[in-house]
Image (spheres, helix red, strand yellow):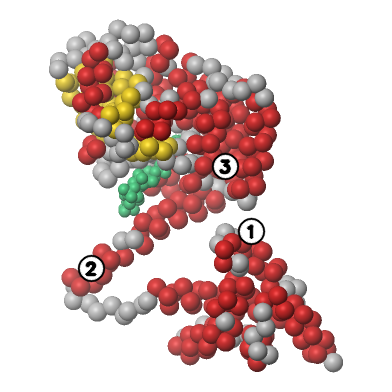
Amino acid sequence: MASYSVLHGSVALITLQNPPVNALSAAVRAGITDAVQRTLKDPQVTSVVICGQNGRFCGGADIREFGGSMSGPPLVPMINAIEAMDKPVVAAIEGVALGGGLELALGCHYRIAHRQALVGLPEVTLGLLPAAGGSQRLPRLIGLPAALDLITTGKHILASEALKLGIVDQVTDGNALNMAVEFARRIVGKPLDPRRISTLPCPSPPDVDFLLDRVLAQVRKRARGALAPVACVGALRAAVFLPFAQGMEKERELMGALFDSGQARALQYAFFSQRLVSQLENHCCYWARYGLVPRHIAPEEILERCLYALTNEGFNILQDGMAAGPEDIDAIYVFGYGWPRHRGGPMFHAGQVGLARVLEKLEHYQHKHPDVPYLKPSPLLRRLVAAGSPAVQKWREFLNKDRVHSQL
Ligand SMILES: CCCCCCCCCCCCC[C@H](O)CC(=O)SCCNC(=O)CCNC(=O)[C@H](O)C(C)(C)COP(=O)(O)OP(=O)(O)OC[C@H]1O[C@@H](n2cnc3c(N)ncnc32)[C@H](O)[C@@H]1OP(=O)(O)O
């Protein structure tokens, strides 16, 4: 939800309340929408400040809502209504203004931030693009090159850097909310048209087509099949060449394509998995509270069972002649499935660990779990170990000889 109060008899304060990061859930959007209506109707109110509870402006749209049917007031008309207000609206940014949180701030007429606050449009890291006007407002505010960088990488930047880029108007080492309230009182009566970012042209260099094509090529190379970074460039192209309203349509169309994609679902799953795993210690407290003694499972056991079963299947694939050499399997994992390049690939990694050790581990886990077929050591792995564990670069040659031998 969002609370509404009036300070000094004239400054309406709208406070986002959804701990821990004040994500823009349906209840928060409804609260803001109601508060905006109250502000418009109250003749005593001459300016507005929007802030977040507990020193955090807003962590963006509520990612948990993406999995279900979304209800409540939609974000885009809500932000447009804030921008259209005829009373100045100031965002007081503390903690974070990320994703939809920054898009909300960009709909305000001014942004005052704590120097250490983090701002950014990280949607791309969730397989999405900034679809509450961020892809259309940010380039109009800071120019195309800087917006391309921020939106296609999703990086968070400090408010002090955001000030240099022109994203925020002032930063403070003190209390950003107090500063925003004082600021809001001072700017009453100043013209608001130049502060409505949607009405501004998008500053872009003369060789804009060249720039967009170059960034698109870079992004495609870096993205390795990820859809969102490419869609982000498409949305920014729209910001340059289309009027705001049509740009917003394009933003929505591109978001629609990403929204239900397997990639967005996978990246959002990864976002929550990462946080869940870091809470594992609390699970231990849960066991202790109920007097249960959990079987100790070392993280290495899970890792090794997954990893060695995978490499073992790689040896079976090589033996069956489905891949000509270990490089074919490693390239699929490094380039197609994000296996860390510095670890070479699963087959190379097996060589690094030592084939005898991989075999020993597989035998150990097979003994513990005889019903899991993937843990049964591949005959090829056994033959490689028996042949003295040749280096991975020699396996292709070994396989050729092995195949010739088996045909004789
Ligand atoms: C035709 C069909 C058309 C369809 C078109 C659809 C149009 C739909 C319009 C939608 C408009 C979209 C608008 C917007 O552009 C989209 C977004 O805003 S996506 C969200 C962007 N924000 C982020 O990516 C920020 C994510 N969060 C973080 O990076 C960090 O959490 C943080 C904010 C930096 C804080 O970090 P920490 O202090 O370390 O805390 P944790 O990370 O541990 O988080 C604490 C807790 O909060 C949960 N959480 C964090 N952010 C969110 C969030 N945005 N939504 C929901 N929950 C969030 C996090 O999971 C932790 O909870 P726990 O998992 O521990 O229970």
Q: Who comes first in sequence, dot 2 or dot 1?
A: 2
Residue 335 badge: 1
Residue at left offset 26%, top offset 32%: 173
Q: Secondary structure at mark 1?
A: helix
Farthest residue, direction right: 408
Q: Is residue 325 left or right of residue 29?
A: right
Q: Position of residue 118 (x, y in %)?
A: 36, 38
Cα gap from disc 3 to disc 1, whole angstroms: 17 Å
Q: Position of residue 59 (x, y in %)?
A: 35, 40
Q: Is residue 95 above or below residue 296?
A: above
Residue at left offset 58%, top offset 73%: 349
* Total numbered labels placed on residues in the image: 3
Q: Position of residue 220 (x, y in %)?
A: 64, 44
Q: Who comes first in sequence, dot 3 or dot 2?
A: 3
Cα gap from disc 3 to disc 2, whole angstroms: 40 Å
Q: Is mark 3 within 8 Å of ligand 1?
A: no
Q: Secondary structure at mark 2?
A: helix
The residue wearing badge 3 is 229
The answer to whether one can see residue 400 in this image is yes
Q: Position of residue 350 (x, y in %)?
A: 58, 77
The residue wearing badge 2 is 286
Name which quarter of the figure residue 27 lies in: top left
Residue at left offset 34%, top offset 61%: 278
